[in-house]
Image (tube, rainbow, N blue to C red):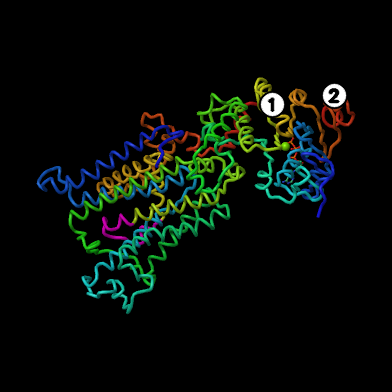
Amino acid sequence: MKKAPVRDKRLDLRDLTVIFDGFKALNKLSLYVDPGELLCIIGPNGAGKTTMMDVITGKTRPDSGTAWFGSEIDLLRLTEPEIVNAGIGRKFQKPTVFEQLTVFENLELALAGGRSFYRTLRARITPAQQNRIDDVLEIIGLTKQRTLLARTLSHGQKQWLEIGMLLMQNPELLLVDEPVAGMTPHEIERTAELLLSLEGEHSIVVVEHDMHFVRSIARRVTVLHEGRVIAEGDMDKVQKDARVKEVYLGE
Amino acid sequence: MVRFGNSIAGRDRGGAWFLGILTLIAIAVPVLNILVPPSSTFHLSAYGIALIGKYLCYGMLALALDLIWGFCGILSLGHAAFFALGGYAMGMYLMREIGPRGVYGNPILPDFMVFLNWKSLPWFWHGFNHFLFAAAMVVAVPALLALVFGWFAFRSRVTGVYFSIITQALTYALMLAFFRNNMGFGGNNGFTDFKDILGFDLHSDGTHAVLLVITAVALGASYLACRAIVDSRAGRVIRAIRDAESRTRFLGYPVESFKLWLFVFSGIIAGIAGALYVPQIGIINPSEFAPINSIEAVIWVAVGGRGTLYGAIAGAVLVNYAKTYLTGAFPEVWLYALGALFVLVTRYLPRGIIGLLPSKDKVVPKAALLGESHEESARSRQAARS
Ligand SMILES: Nc1ncnc2c1ncn2[C@@H]1O[C@H](COP(=O)(O)OP(=O)(O)OP(=O)(O)O)[C@@H](O)[C@H]1O
Ligand SMILES: [Mg+2]
């Protein structure tokens, strides 16, 4: 039996190593997230950011290391659906909303509740669920678009809808992979506002390449390179770091 | 309570039209046959009734296919197998119902068994002298096949074109099996020369008129059941599976079990359609399992319009009407005409004939029909951006 770490962190990763065919995608990676904190992770292509999220969500099993969600839950012992139920929501790099369903229906499918064929056949939206959907529509700014098919949304709106779908399950920890890739400057600004509005209520980990965006939301930044953390701190501190300049910002 | 079109479809106007026309047919056919004298040009012969009955049965098969293909993206190229199995179950009842009136006069054994020198009834023929047992088998046999086949296929994540190919193989294998005399299903002759059903003479116009009304009711009820499914939350999950399967799984929905139950339900509808077809047409033989039959059914759905339910039914009726005409006038051109129709429709009418109608019910957008996956379109958009 592994022992839970003593530090009371929302998420605590220690010495995670993932080896693909002899290549270390993660190399003794350690990092933590405080409750209610918004942590930004940056790093060059192939640094291991997506792999780290894969480990947290149970998609990839590490070769060694520990991953704790709070002091109670050992993530490495749970399956992917169990991790979702434990309260970790993930937004993938590619936006995947259900294009032929309306914005409202997309959120409806993300509601907590029976998932079986029989249960969904008989399911009706309760007033409480209706309110929850309305709230989330408000948060992601798509109240006016509620009856539109998701395929008619702009790229940015789809990303927000997907964040909304995560919020339906009220996760304690949100993992967001490259939310602003392909967005217009205005959409990037709105996304920053959205993520900041979720801070406090949820712990959030944002992986992003867009430095400008990271600067606009980050309190604390962790820099990954070749599967390990090479710097950590506020944006100014990180940008002054010699190694960071060398591997990432200087390029 | 069936709740209609609460979402994309808005009100189910197409469905209301369809049910209206179906009701009209169910009323007009017996009237034109029984009340209009045979001398009148408006008289409908028994042959005419059987033809309409056949179209409705095919419409039901198309409905079953559209439910899984149009809404869940499962393209079965073996759906006629369920139709044929339902037909065979009904055929077995009708054979036993002949009793001692067969050519050989054996009260228990159907003619073909006497001909093969069989001394007793094979075990699986027992019970088929009872209509209710046969009716239960009409549902149970296709359901069981769909359950077992679907369980293996979906559990091993067989999707897309691979699924289509193995469904073709399934119906082909069944055809070969039913062709064999020692299978006990009458070999290549199948079953025919039926006398009556529940004591009603199958050669009388009245029986045919009643069978047609029953078929219309079954088709209408199947439509309503399918509509209730696709309009429920389960229906939205099903469309979500069609658009982004792994995303749906990630939301916690048991994708395989949704596909499986939908496939089973669809198989049952196809089986009932086959069972209604046999007494009206008067024959069932292994050619009903022929792979081309399943492919034709897919073409009906594509021609009518995928993902609308009523469009598939309309497609089945129209294509078969054309077939009846063409195979009468120019028998050799039918397959070419069918192929050309399919190419033209997929190329120029991705929404099918229903897509031509002025309508606000844009149920399946063009991109989905062309099979452009959502990931692909997202990628091309990203590419266009950078
Ligand atoms: N399933 C896999 N098998 C083999 N190698 C993999 C696999 N997944 C990732 N890798 C490799 O691991 C390294 C880390 O990949 P990862 O996707 O985590 O990087 P990233 O930081 O998310 O990069 P990007 O900024 O491009 O998204 C890369 O070199 C990648 O090629
Ligand atoms: Mg990545």
Seen at 84% across and 44% down, the residue is A6
Q: On residue A12, which mark appears?
A: none
- Chain containing the residue with disc 1: A
Asked if both marks, 2 and 1, belong to the same chain, the answer given is yes
Q: Position of residue B240 (x, y in %)?
A: 53, 40
- The main secondary structure of the magenta stretch is helix
Range shown magenta: B275-290
**As drawn, is B176 to the left or to the right of B282?**
right
How many marks overall? 2
Q: CA distance from mark 2 to mark 1?
A: 23 Å
| Ligand 1: image quarter | top right
Residue placed under numbered mark 2 in the picture: A236
Residue placed under numbered mark 1 in the picture: A197
- The quarter of the picture where residue A38 lies is top right
Mark 1 CB in 8 Å range of ligand 2? Answer: no
**As drawn, is A24 to the left or to the right of B187?**
right
Q: Is residue B282 magenta?
A: yes
Q: Amino acid at mark 1?
A: Ser
